[in-house]
Amino acid sequence: MPGTTILRARVAHTPRDPFTTSDALETFDDGAVAFADGVIVATGAAEDVLAQHPGAEVQDRRDCVLIPGMVDTHVHYPQIPVIGAMGLELLEWLAQRTLPEEAKMADLAHATKAAERFTRLLAGNGTTSALVFGSHFPQAQHALFEAADRSGLRIASGLVVSDRNLRPELEVTPDEAHAESTRLIERWHGQGRLRYAVTPRFSVSATEEMLGACRTLLDEHPTTLFTSHVNESPGEIAFVKQLFPHSRDYIGTYEDAGLLNDRSVLAHNVHASDEELHRLACAHTAVAHCPSSNAFLSSGIFPMARHVEHGVCFGMGTDVGAGTGLSMLKEALVAYHVQMVRTEGQMLGPAQLLYLATAAGAKAIGLNDLAGDLTPGKQADLVLLKPPPNSTLEAVLEEAPDWNAALGAIFTLAREECVVETRVSGEIVHTRTK
């Protein structure tokens, strides 16, 4: 096929779900991915792919491991400066560190700089798609969409709306939230690789009227997403119980407003009852699992095995700034650690971690037809990983006896400095020259 490019490398992806099948991981020691017009046309052994496409441009990257572009299902664009704010639990962390930082987004120059930095760092960490918690300020949300559009990343985001229990400058009326969100949707939803997500911050900061305005937006724009927070910490859950005495639980506050469907993604869900999990599964609502944030804020450990048992779809999110960085590789390692120490935790191996960092997230945010693995027909969203010279990772990979050992080393040791190239639809959106 004219215009075909072949990347020859060590290749690994999970075209099947390792939580439900034992043969989910597909690997090629000397592999190749061919793509044309941004679409993958072949993945397999290099010998086979090269034979199928004799006229293709071949880029020899056999010093790299090629995996699908990673998918972050929950991350806050204004919160990069908050990373590392230690010694606080959720509600205190919000009041003392995070909301004052988010209030700075009223300054358009500050917001523009933050948006450009944020999208650059996502690509630099190998993240090609993300569901992004935006800003409370319309001009700052425009700045994020503008930066995301230029970056080439697949970004879904929206204006964060609240009408109580925050700083006054972060609150609006439901009518104002509807009007400003509508303007943003009409300008940005479906523009390039961008999508809009209706985003009340959480039920602590949203009245029933505000949640009703969010439902109206979803009804008026039926291809938009919905995202918020749920069941993150015991103190938050108790507060929600006071604010919504007629709802049966935290999930119920969104359920009562008609906000849960197959386009909804709720972050955290650490403290969930079996009944809540059953209702999420029935609604086809996904969860964003944020292990480093949950540990950092002492919120608790995600009941992954129970989510699997109930059939709740979940991906993984870095949740910066409570999360400890934008690396999905690091996030996978934290997920592994906390599940290993949790009573009745979910046993995880390299296949599950690769799936959580890529295909699971794509499924959670409605991109599984486009991205998440290297199946022909999907978009060529790819990451090339290479250990720094003379690094510990290089030493371990040189001795790795099989792919489980190699991927285990990558998730344990590889971080931002190992991401040498990131592509979205075959287009380079990040390259590391040193």
Image (spheres, rainbow, N blue to C red):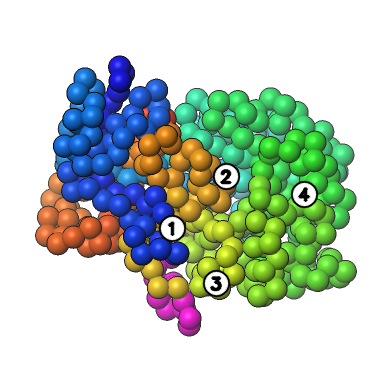
Asked whether 23 or 273 is in front, the reply is: 23
Residue that label 4 marks: 162
Q: Is residue 340 magenta?
A: yes
The residue tagged with tag 4: helix, strand or loop? Answer: loop
The label on residue 366 is 2
Q: Position of residue 345 (x, y in %)?
A: 46, 76
Label 3, on which residue?
Answer: 309
Q: Secondary structure at mark 2?
A: loop
Q: Residues within 10 Å of mark 2 (few under 14, many from 20)?
A: some
The 10 Å Cα crowd at callout 1, few under 14, some 14 to 19, many 20 or more, is some
Q: CA distance from mark 4 to mark 1?
A: 37 Å
Query: The N terminus lies in which quarter of the figure?
Result: top left
Q: Which residue is mark 1?
A: 17
Span highlighted in magenta in the image: 334-345
Q: Nearer the viewer, residue 200 or 304?
A: 304
Q: Residue at x 85, y 49 (%)?
A: 212
Please give the name of the residue rendered at 20% of the width and 27% of the height, measured from the top-left corner.
Answer: 58
Q: CA distance from mark 2 to mark 4?
A: 25 Å
* Label pair 4/1, CB-CB below 8 angstroms: no
Q: How far separated are the C-alphas under marks 2 and 1? A: 16 Å
Q: Which of the 4 image quarters holds residue 135?
A: top right
Is the Cβ of the residue at disc 2 closer than 8 Å to that at disc 1?
Answer: no
Instruction: Give the amino acid type for the residue marked by disc 3 in the picture.
Output: Glu
Answer with mark 3 or mark 4, whichever residue precedes in sequence. Answer: 4
**Which numbered disc flags the more N-terminal residue, 3 or 1?**
1
Q: Which residue type carries mark 2?
A: Gly
Whole-Å distance between the Cαs marked 3 and 1?
A: 14 Å
Rendering coords of residue 371 (x, y %): 46, 41
Of mark 4 and mark 1, the one earlier in the sequence is 1
Residue 7 placement (x, y as % from top left): 25, 33
Q: Nearer the viewer, mark 2 or mark 4?
A: 2
